[in-house]
Image (spheres, coloured by chain):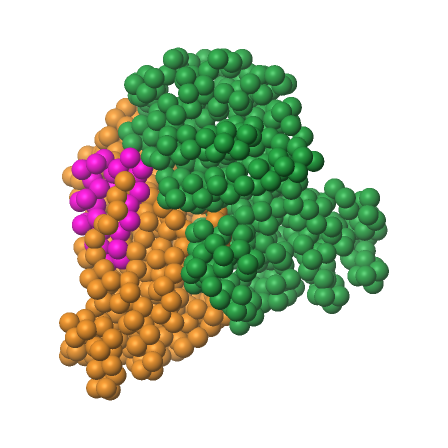
Chain colours: A green, B orange
Amino acid sequence: MSGLIEALASVVGQDGCLSRPEELLVYECDALTLHAAKPTAVVFPRSTDDVVRIVEACRRFGTPFVPRGAGTGLSGGATANEGAVVVECSRMNRILELNAEDRYAVVEPGVVNADLSKAALPSGLFYAPDPSSQLACTIGGNVAENSGGPHTLKYGATTNHVLALELVLPSGAVVQLGSATGWTVGYDWVGAVVGSEGTLGIVTQATLRLEPIPEGVETLLGIFADVVAACRTVSGIIQSGLVPAALEVIDRRTIAAVEASVYAAGLPLDAGAVLIVELDGPAPALPAQVERVRGIAAREGATRVEVARDDAERQRFWRARKGAFGAMGRMAPDLYVHDAVVPRARLPEVIEKVCAIGDRYGLKLSNVFHAGDGNLHPNISFDRRDSDELERVIAAGAEILETCVEAGGVISGEHGIGSEKRDYMGLLFSEADLDAMKRLRTVFDPDGVCNPGKIFPTTRFCVESNPRARGYDRVPLES
Amino acid sequence: MIPREAVQRIAAALGEEAVEEHPARELDGLAVAATLRPADGEAVARALEAVGACGLAAVVKGGGNRLGIGNLPNREALFLATERLSGVDEFEPAEGVCHARAGTRLAAADAIVRPHGWEIPFDAPGETATVGGVIAAAAVGPRAHGHGRPRDLVLGLEVALASGQRTHCGGRVVKNVTGYDLNKLYTGSFGSLGVIEGAWLRLRPLPERTAVFEASASRLEGVGARGLAAARRATARAVAIAVSVRGAECDVRFAIELAGDAPSVERDAAWIEEHCDARAAEAGAVDRMRALQGRDAEAFGLRFRIDALSSRLEPVLAQLCGRCTSVLVYPGLGLLFADLRLDRADAGQVDSAFRFAARSARAGGGSFVCESAPAWAKQGRDVFGAAASALPLIESLKQRFDPGRILNPGRFAGGI
């Protein structure tokens, strides 16, 4: 193995290659601490050429590799299964071009999400995908996971904003995919690579669409007696034909956690749930839209609806939402965040079922989620040292996913499958469906060396959970 | 000529009513003498199995509007028509999504969702355009500027692979990262990877108000900039510019469609009237422009679709007008459709036209596709232009999805 370490260090220098156990510890997992695997080494390339040489070295020594952004992922997508080398892209963090006229930016993968919008601000533009971790997460990670965020409802997820990619293939070859015009000839490779969780190669450059900053914004905070009423309001808004920029629900337990933390936003502790509604767009449109939302919320039983009077108040509303995950650190040592999506019209009934599941298993389950997309985030606070509680967490999680799939939903809206949910893929996909995905995988990575052990289910679970999947283990990765 | 026993074998698999032998219909020089019309997804799968077993190939046919886009077929093929896969079988007005079978015409689907305040957000030209055809061709019209492109609107697909395996990808929800996004690969693949059976679509709410404007000009200067400025108004749903070139002169017509809430549309309407020297027009103005996009090129004519960066629209348009008879521009989308007329059936002139299209695309920072050309002009050329470094990936994907080269044989990028 020392031969590999030497080869990697010759590419990135000693200060760009970690291999001592104490150095590797922090790279054993991403933000989902339930899944961990020890990498052989962690390397910090500074250029596409470095990445190519790292990949070539790994191939020479028969060691797999996994690209990693800021490690904020929530599905174990960046864990170094099979002793993989972690290719940490944080030092490739330059904004290479910001073209205001054509509304795009060319960036390296290690650029922090929020930094791009900051850089585009003087041009009256912004980068729309805004994951809750946007102050830390990087574009490379966003591309790998097809990250969303509160404003996905109107603006779409990462896939709707990536125009072109430079990708180092697992063979070491470099390909340019897509175009800054947003049009491409042949297959939509950019669309296939975005959201592929780093299993098709390592993104070394991304061309991203920038949006004009909307001329007006109104942010409302609706107070409800219970989370179901807040969800009914969401359904009512969607059905009315309004397309808000964001529709976010925070439930009672989350409110309590937030208000007890440094993120306290003055939310009423006696509320069953609050709903943040953000409307943006042409200024003349907003007053009428605000009134429509007020009317729908009142009809569904809102006890109060506040409209942010200024930017400071808007930030206060959002502080509660964006600080929610941090605040949950007060509730228990560990947090398991689920990410299923259900048809929006089914939200009220599904959220009731999800809460009932948490209660039945005796768990601290709270909800803060992208209601407008139907993207639930049931958060289970627990202590993994308590093996009985851990078992209940896992069992409740499985039941939540099954409930969402039964309602016509899917198991991940923005966090990805990673190693966390791969054994639940059989809930949604048949053997033939997964085989089609594998065919794509083998185009890019016929040997399965790029981020192994992600997305695709292990045979045992797949066969047991889904009779259609029988024989999946006989589908070779190579073809 | 398709062997009689092959037709009989396929008819046995599908039923006699699903197989029509007919006088040869030309598809880029290939005589297609039979059409398969499977009644459902299961029948599509059986049809593909039978076609493969007979050593034949199939060209999927939706409304038939985009069949002319492609390279010359490299083997004998049948049409596999989706017209019996028709209907919107699920529609959730509370959700803003619907599931349509592939052969459903856009107008028919729209008629179902519109009374509930939604619209099908596809805008491809052609009255017979189908949901599956639009997705397979990633076909857009001018309203894609406001609606988004098919890649952004398809939530899930059911696809029969060449092997006859039936698969699905994506789902019915509006946000989804569960597994690879194969929706994106199938969208715009021109039926080269599988046959789309049906699709979940994200609908758009009907706007409260629309307003349509027309303008004209006799000079090219500033046309691109004017169109782009109009397209960047908040409520602009479609902007189309048709340029007819007559020697040193030209005739320029604009059609602009605004859509949204009433106060914003009224505000933008005033801006359009003042800054674009435009006047109110009837609702069909944009559709008439779109019809130009849907026309086949004239005899001895070639039509190129070129994409360009916004900042380069103006010079690319000027360059095209130096040689083309007409150019249709969608400035908000960065698309130009350019018609070239050849003097005669001469391969040298075609070479020259392709080089010109490539130069224009390079100047615009984009790419080109020759969307309409007589079969003789396609000989020895890739109408999709250069697929560059992705070509090995294209070939590899085709090999994995359709190793028998059954689907749309030879016609997609790279001649696969």
Q: Is residue B16 visible?
A: yes
- Residue B64: x and y in percent read 23, 64
- Residue A5: x and y in percent read 81, 58
Is B260 in front, or is A29? A29
Reply above or below: B287 against B258. Answer: below
Residues in magenta, as a range: B93-121
Q: Residue at x 25, y 75 (%)?
A: B13
Reply above or below: B398 against B158. Answer: below
Is A244 in front, or is A322? A322
- Residue A18: x and y in percent read 80, 49
Horizontal relation, residue A8 to residue A331: left or right? right
Q: Is residue B390 magenta?
A: no
User: In the rendered picture of this protein, how many numbered marks are placed on residues?
Assistant: 0
Q: Is residue B108 magenta?
A: yes
| Screen quadrant of the N terminus of chain A | bottom right
Q: Residue at x 62, y 46 (%)?
A: A76
Q: Is residue A190 visible?
A: no
Q: Residue at x 58, y 54 (%)?
A: A454
- Residue A470: x and y in percent read 47, 63
Reply above or below: A212 against A285. Answer: below
Horizontal relation, residue A139 to residue B283: left or right? right
Horizontal relation, residue A323 to residue B240: left or right? right
Q: Quadrant for residue A48, please give it.
A: bottom right
Q: Residue at x 56, y 30 (%)?
A: A363
